[in-house]
Image: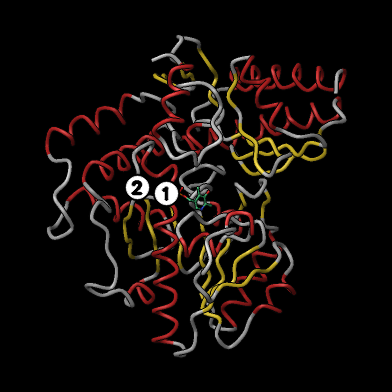
Amino acid sequence: MLTEELERYSSQYLMQTYARVPISIVRGQGCKVYDAEGREYLDCVAGVAVNALGHGHPDLVMAIEQQARHLIHASNLYYSEPQVQLAQQLVKLSFGQKVFFCNSGAEANEAAIKLARKYASENIAPERCDIITMHNSFHGRTLATLTATGQSKVQQGFAPLPTGFSYATMNDIESVKSQITDRTAAVMIEPVQGEGGVVAADQSFMKELRALCTERRILLIFDEVQTGIGRTGTMFAYEQYEIEPDIMTLAKGLGGGLPIGACIATDTIAQAFGPGSHGSTFGGNPLACAASLAMLRVIQDSRLLEKVQATGAYLKKGLQELQRRIPLIKEIRGMGLLQGVELSIDGKSVVKDCLARRVLINCTMERVLRFIPPLIITQKDIDHLLNVLSDVLNKRLKNP
Ligand SMILES: *Cc1c(COP(=O)(O)O)cnc(C)c1O
């Protein structure tokens, strides 16, 4: 089906929850994707930080093929080897000791919220059930996670919202302190706010936050749905802050494209979940876990984290050079291959102009261009992205 036809059918049959860019991607290879008309694009969105190994990575494809022939789904009524193996890997790689699997970021955060409430109310004090999150955060679209999300625009029209959430300001420890009450169970934070405009937590803030939570017996939850699995140049972003959370959530990059989410916690906290306290029909199914295991193997075998550190730094340097030449660029922010460019103009038209030049980029918070390419992107592809961006912004500068 050609794009025009798809647009018509989509508006006829689909709930109109997405403002889509008018192309239909039908195939991908590495960092390139192809539309229904056969045009090639450089993909610097990667399914919103999902396709970490790009498209069609042979190891990932093979793992999925083999597992699909074996067993796609059986149910959590039974034991599952890929699920245990993946949990073991995640425990090896992180601070965590126990894992719960689900299918998305929102679900991983739901699990984290439920776990924190159950642990705190049963083990610290019965009234401990409130969660503090940050303004401009993004934690998902379910009722609890959109309430956790510190942006009123996503909450509009969905009242009554669950109670027990309040909001503090990122990088302002006094603001967190002012939200703490004797009902506070946890603080939930993204090390780098992705949807919220690529805003990273400061080193000093994170250290103070960790100390504050420990002192007040408040759990610290890191939402690493976007930053986890190598995106920032380390397996998890928390490693770069030299602190550890008590609970961490993962999703986007975890399955290399298959839907999978995880909530990871220390043994002590994980004890709060016993049989029947939480669950998911599809969570941790063999197919998604096999894909995820292949992802983790490729990351380790190809020394991908070191490459992300190098290409992330290269992208940042290139963007900073553009900033010196183009006054429309206000600020460059981010870590690793999660980079943002704050503009003084609306970003949507820049995304459109890049699309016309066959480069896919994304924009959040109206004015922030976000670059979240596959982790396998090369310097050559980054050069191409920078050239196109330079042309597009320069043209915009001349004809505002
Ligand atoms: C994308 C995202 C979510 C939501 O993930 P879904 O899979 O869409 O439910 C939650 N938190 C963060 C930080 C995200 O980037």
Q: Locate the C terminus and report the quarter of the image it occupies.
A: top right
Q: Where is residue 45 drawn, in percent x and y?
A: 54, 31
**Considering depth in this image, is 284 or 208 the residue closer to the camera?**
284
Q: Residues within 10 Å of mark 2 (few under 14, many from 20)?
A: many
Amino acid at dot 2: Ile
Dot 2 corresponds to which residue? 260
User: Which residue is the site of mark 1?
Assistant: 251
81, above or below 388, in the image: below
Picture colour scheme:
secondary structure
Q: Secondary structure at mark 1?
A: loop
Q: Position of residue 348 (x, y in %)?
A: 68, 31
On the image, the x and y values in percent for residue 17 come to: 50, 42
Q: Is residue 273 above or below residue 53?
A: below
Mark 1: C-beta under 8 Å from nearest atom of ligand 1 = yes
- The type of residue carrying mark 1 is Ala
**Pointers 1 and 2 in contact (CB under 8 A)?**
yes
Q: CA distance from mark 1 to mark 2?
A: 6 Å
